[in-house]
Amino acid sequence: MSKLISFEFECSACNKIHDALVHSDVRKRTCPNCQAPDAERIVSAPRLGIRMGVDAVGNPSMGRKWARMHEQARKVDTKRARDNGPGAWGSDGADVRR
């Protein structure tokens, strides 16, 4: 069973483009504007989500957060190795809590 996905369709009769929530195997549907039965599914530009590294305006968001988080973890590991020696937990990337 295919799941419902949002696709764009272009009507060849009125040249209007509309979105529709349809099953993934649907290639044609009725145009909601002119009721012509031959609106074809078209390839549209991908939509970037917030979790893909940019927010709706194009500013870095999750990518910057990810980099900051890993930079902080690296600093903690470096300090732990400096204070407790190179064999200290986390200084070589090994997790001995398992």
Image (cartoon, helix red, strand yellow):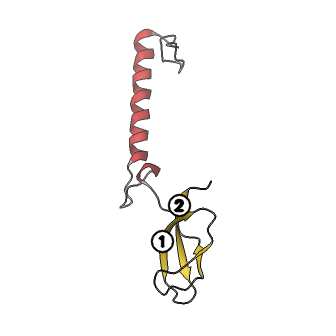
Q: Secondary structure at mark 2?
A: strand
Residue at point 44% right, 55% down? 49
Residue placed most toward the observer, 95 or 81: 95
| 1 or 2: tag closer to the N-terminus | 2
- In the rendered view, would you say 96 is above or below 24? above
Amino acid type of the residue that numbered disc 2 sits on in the rendered structure: Ile
Image position of 87 with respect to 26: above or below: above
The answer to the question of whether label 1 and label 2 lie on touching residues, with beta carbons closer than 8 A, is: no
> In which image quadrant can residue 83 be found?
top left
Indicate the secondary structure of the residue bearing disc 1. Answer: strand
At 41% from the left and 52% from the top, the residue drawn is 50
Residue beneath the point at 39% across and 38% down: 68
How many marks on residues?
Answer: 2
Reading the image, the residue beneath label 2 is 5
At 56% from the left edge and 55% from the top edge, which residue is drawn?
3
Give the answer, above or below, for where 71 lies relative to 30. above
Number of residues whose C-alpha sits closer than 10 Å to that of mark 1, classed few (under 14), some (14–19) or many (20 or more): few
Question: Circle 2: is it few (<14), some (14-19), or many (20+) Cα within 10 Å?
Answer: few
42 and 65: which is toward the camera: 42
The alpha-carbon separation of the residues under discs 1 and 2 comes to 10 Å
Q: Position of residue 27 (x, y in %)?
A: 63, 71
Q: Say which mark, if any, is on residue 46.
A: none
Residue extending furthest toward the bottom = 13
The percent position of residue 79, horizontal first and vertical second, equals 40, 19
| Residue 91 rendering spot, x and y as whole percentages | 49, 18
In the rendered image, residue 53, in percent from the top left (x then y), is placed at 44, 51
In this rendering, is residue 27 above or below 56?
below
Of 22 and 77, nearer the camera is 22
Compared across the picture, whether 67 is left or right of 36 comes to left
**Residue on which disc 1 sits:** 19
What's the amino acid at mark 1?
Asp
